[in-house]
Amino acid sequence: MHCWRETTQSQYTTYLNKWLRYSDQRGSDPDAPTPELLVDFLSDMLFDEKASISALNTARSAVATILPEPKELSAHPLIRRFMRGAFNMRPTYPKYCTV
């Protein structure tokens, strides 16, 4: 965690704390997230609470940093399908209508 900048630490800490609480409630190992459990976390704790796609991406990245190979979890087909579906259901829009 010392390699992260202060802003990254503050962003990731929020989602890692939520992840720890969620995995504790589910009785699972927080240090070994499965793709299914991560999708449940993103869906139950964030998407259902109207979190933005940016927040979902940050949470996914934060949880993936726990693993020795973070890209394995982030690139998993189930995670990618969930993120694509979340984006389709809640797309991002430009901040301004005209430029």
Image (cartoon, grey):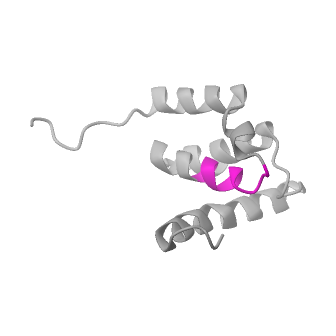
Asked which quadrant contains residue 75, the reply is top right
> Would you say the magenta stretch is mainly helix, strand or loop?
helix
Does any portion of residue 52 appear in the rendered image? no
The percent coordinates of residue 8 (x first, y second) are 52, 65
Task: Give the residue at x 47% y 69%.
Answer: 7
Picture quarter with the C terminus: top left
The percent coordinates of residue 98 (x first, y second) are 10, 35
Task: Give the residue at x 63% y 47%.
Answer: 60
The magenta segment is 59-68
The percent coordinates of residue 38 (x first, y second) are 73, 44
Q: Nearer the viewer, residue 89 or 94?
A: 94
Task: Give the residue at x 22% y 44%.
Answer: 95
Residue farthest front in this picture: 3
Residue farthest left in this picture: 99
In this rendering, would 74 be left or right of 85? Answer: right
The percent coordinates of residue 33 (x first, y second) are 81, 48
Is residue 64 one of those drawn in magenta?
yes
Task: Give the residue at x 82% y 42%.
Answer: 34
Is residue 6 one of those drawn in magenta?
no
